Amino acid sequence: MGASIRDDVVIPGLADDDERAAFVRARRRGVSHARALFPRNPAPGDDVVVELTAGPDAPAADAWVDVEGERRPLVLAGVEWDTLVWGYVRRYRGTIPGRATGAVHYALGVGDVQADGGRRQAYVVGDDGAPPWADEAIVYQVWVDRFWPVAGSGPADRYGGTFAGLVERLDHVAALGVDTVWLNPIHPSTAYHGYEVTDYMAVDPALGTLEDFDRMVDALHERSLRLVLDFVPSHVSDRHPAFLAARADAASPYAGWFRFDRWPDDYRTFFGVPTMPQLNHDEPAVRDHLAQAARFWIARGVDGLRLDYAGGSTHELWAELRTAARAERADCWLFGEVVDTPAAQLEYEGLLDGCLDFQLAQALRAAFGYRTLGGVQLAAFLDAHEAAFPATFSRPSFLDNHDLDRMLWLTGGDTRRLRAAAVCQFTLDGPPIVYYGTEVGLSQALSIKAAGDRHARLPMPWGDDQDGALHAFYRELAALRRGLPREPRRTVEADGARLVYTRGKVVVELDVDTGSAVVRDGADVLLRA
């Protein structure tokens, strides 16, 4: 293998101890809210308690919260010495009186310094949280272009897959035992991967027409398969009409949609990529456009949205988009890609239904792929990780995805270790996601770090190129998941490489060294990896 665990699931800005210390120090020295509000998902009429901290760099002034133009004082709730910043950190608290159903906008600060660098704040009143069907979901992630070309192949970095081709292969998807399909971006884009959107309310012509999309939705629903779309709200393509208009005329109404440091050529981008200009979510018209786009797709039968780079968008956007999406369909599932710490992910409680579980992926890949985490350490992580999140916070799990080296490649082609990791994934809380091809042995020849992300996005193998035994195992695994008791997981043994836990009467035995896995119900073996 050409990859190191140091390259895996890297959180930007928190990649090593120095970066982490600098992050904590900066937050503690200034004025920070970090969405410390309770409850985060209030019912209509519920008061909401908000808190902020003010470190040694904060002004000696009164703290406040401004709720939609009405400013209220916060009171000093405590002071503590923080050795990391070598100074006192003050903690302030206040109450926002209960509001009616909908999005509530607010800001906090000390003196003339607004919390969190001026980040706009919001929460949602009266939302019931993740739909019940999401708790039971088994998700299959599909890259349409890579799945099944109807005829021929595409240009250099395209493979010719279409909506119609996916429909042709729905027997494979349904037989796998999943009930939800998540599609990577399907919008027109200037990049093969679809994450440089040029029109939020259209489909990539290479994949088909809107009518083809509608037929695909109908075909999925006829098979009782739900559909989740990848939605990319943080940035667009530099060929998006709004960005072209903004660069052509500084007085254009679209100029405020983006953040120009110096018009027209110096603008904020997605991780420094000039073809991906950031949207300015402080602009109401931007938030409205994205909310309307979400409603557009949900009205066409989409059951949920996977929200790309959710940490790069404001809380105001998520509050308004959530309200709009729920108005269109009360049981839509909204989960975000927040590649960050558990504490940072929990800041989205009440704004999103939950977040993709990157911490779990990191642990499972370390244990079964890189072999740097033993059974004892994995058990300790799982016990703490599950206790850290409320049961109402949706945590879709995965072993690999389009941004990570495939799990089978990490194991050196050892399907037994892949199976053991999958057993662990499918017997934990959180809806499991299977990345297309993982279930039939799709791997790669080179690491993403060495050769680019295309190597984790190769076309789906079919026929004799598939690992039939692995496919059969995944079908058994989905069936096992369906019958798994909903009782909490409990660790009963952790010794060296060995980890044993229960879900009700079901016992899961794992060995991270040998890659063995057995699931039992009493004397009966339900599944063996």
Image (spheres, rainbow, N blue to C red):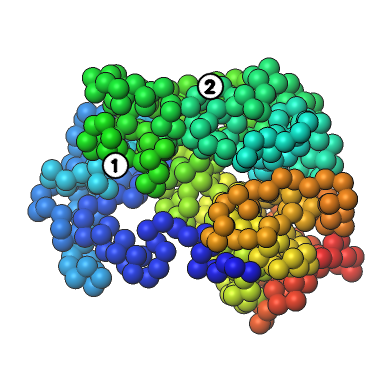
Q: Residue at x 68, y 35 (%)?
A: 154
- How far separated are the C-alphas under marks 2 and 1? 28 Å
Q: Residue 206: x and y, percent?
A: 64, 27
Identify the residue at image location x=55%, y=27%: 188
User: What mark, if any, has residue 119 been given in the picture?
Assistant: 1
On the image, numbered disc 2 is attached to which residue?
A: 201
Pick the residue in front: 120 or 106. Answer: 120
Q: Quadrant of the C terminus?
A: bottom right
Dot 1: few (<14), some (14–19), or many (≥20) neighbours within 10 Å? some
Q: Is residue 223 left or right of residue 72?
A: right
Q: Earlier in the sequence, mark 2 or mark 1?
A: 1
Say if residue 526 shows up in the picture.
yes
Left/right of residue 367 with respect to residue 338 in the rendered view: right
Q: Position of residue 292 (x, y in %)?
A: 48, 21
Three-letter code, disc 1? Arg
Q: Amino acid at mark 2?
A: Met
10 Å neighbourhood of mark 2: few (<14), some, or many (≥20)? some
Q: Is residue 49 left or right of residue 367?
A: left
Q: Give SS at disc 1.
A: loop
Residue 520 in the image, given as x and y percentages of width and height: 83, 65
x then y, percent, for residue 469:
87, 57
Q: Residue at x 47, y 44 (%)?
A: 309
User: Residue furthest toward the front?
Assistant: 156
- In this view, the residue in front, 161 or 347, is 161
Is residue 54 shown left or right of residue 46? left
Could you say which disc has been placed on residue 389 in the image?
Answer: none
x 63%, y 69%: residue = 1
Q: Nearer the viewer, mark 2 or mark 1?
A: 2
User: Would residue 359 be visible to someone looking at this image?
Assistant: no
